[in-house]
Image (spheres, helix red, strand yellow):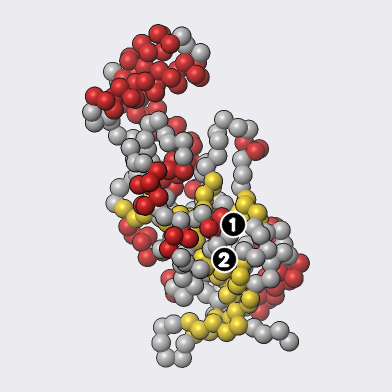
Amino acid sequence: METLKEFELCHPCVDLHKIPHLYRFKSIKGAEDSHLEDFFVHGKLYHPLPTQLNDPFECKPHFVRPSSASEARELRKYLAKQLRSHQGMPWKQAKEQAKLMMTDQNRTIEMFRRAAATTYGRARLCSFTTSKENLLFWSHYGDSHQGMCLEFDSAGGPMRNARQVKYDDYYPNVDVPQPADESAAKPALVKSRNWKYESEYRSFIIPDITEDESKWIRFIELAPSSLTGIYFGACAQDKDKDRILDLVERGIFDPRIYDAELSESTFFLKFKERTCA
């Protein structure tokens, strides 16, 4: 079982790396007015579900069989506690039932897998990166340079607590019982090595599935100082830029505004800041 210290070393918060800004690329054309208004006017940062992201492997943890007698005992003890807590079994009966369940570990592991899929399938994730210059980001997430890149102050709000994503060839394991601390979020912070170029940090919300679904959080409200810049893509149309600027005028943020331009001689972008008239 990974300790909290090991988790923090593997998935450090952004402030540990002293990264001043984090970035999110967004489309403008396909965005609903209500979603844009939630963010720019009211400062609500939406955290989508894993199924709303572009990677079907998101939040797919798996369990492994106990590798030692002590791990098997701990798992059996945990099962007995769960049976006693959730089904009201007497302690002796719960221990006997847990022992019986351990004789069919495949079935027990599958039960845990389904429970984890339910929990992590309802997690809320918000992805950031460390660069506004990456041309692939502008193509993939910035609507082929027709969208925008949002710049956030990494010292405040959920950005400060955003954790670094680790890239691996294997799904993360889930410990049983699951940790009661932040390390329980590990399945939301591991992706395939193919995504390593994204240099991703994530803010996340793991819901308490015992609560009523209406109480689950979908947004995190930001402070007015959180959004420090808006970079419009080199191919963004004026009407789309005006759509965003009108919302900014009505909203809580006061970001600097930039227009991206293609370099004349290299495969790079230049960003020209707008000045007040």
Do the residues under discs 1 and 2 have CB atoms within 8 angstroms?
yes
Mark 2 crowd level (few <14, some 14–19, many ≥20, 10 Å Cα): some
On screen, residue 86 above or below 128: above
Residue shown at the point (65%, 54%) measured from the top left: 221
Q: Nearer the viewer, residue 5 or 45?
A: 5
Q: Position of residue 92 (x, y in %)?
A: 40, 8
On screen, residue 189 above or below 153: above
Q: Residue 275, located in which quarter of the rendered image?
A: bottom right
Quarter holding the N terminus is top left
On screen, residue 232 above or below 45: below
Q: Residue 171, located in which quarter of the rendered image?
A: top left
Of all residues, the one furthest to the left in this rendering is: 68
Q: Nearer the viewer, residue 134 or 81?
A: 81
Residue with the mark numbered 2: 153
Q: In what element is the residue under mark 1?
A: helix
**Amino acid on which disc 2 is placed:** Asp
Q: Position of residue 267 (x, y in %)?
A: 41, 83
**Amino acid on which disc 1 is placed:** Gly
Disc on res. 157: 1
Of all residues, the one furthest to the bottom in this rendering is: 264
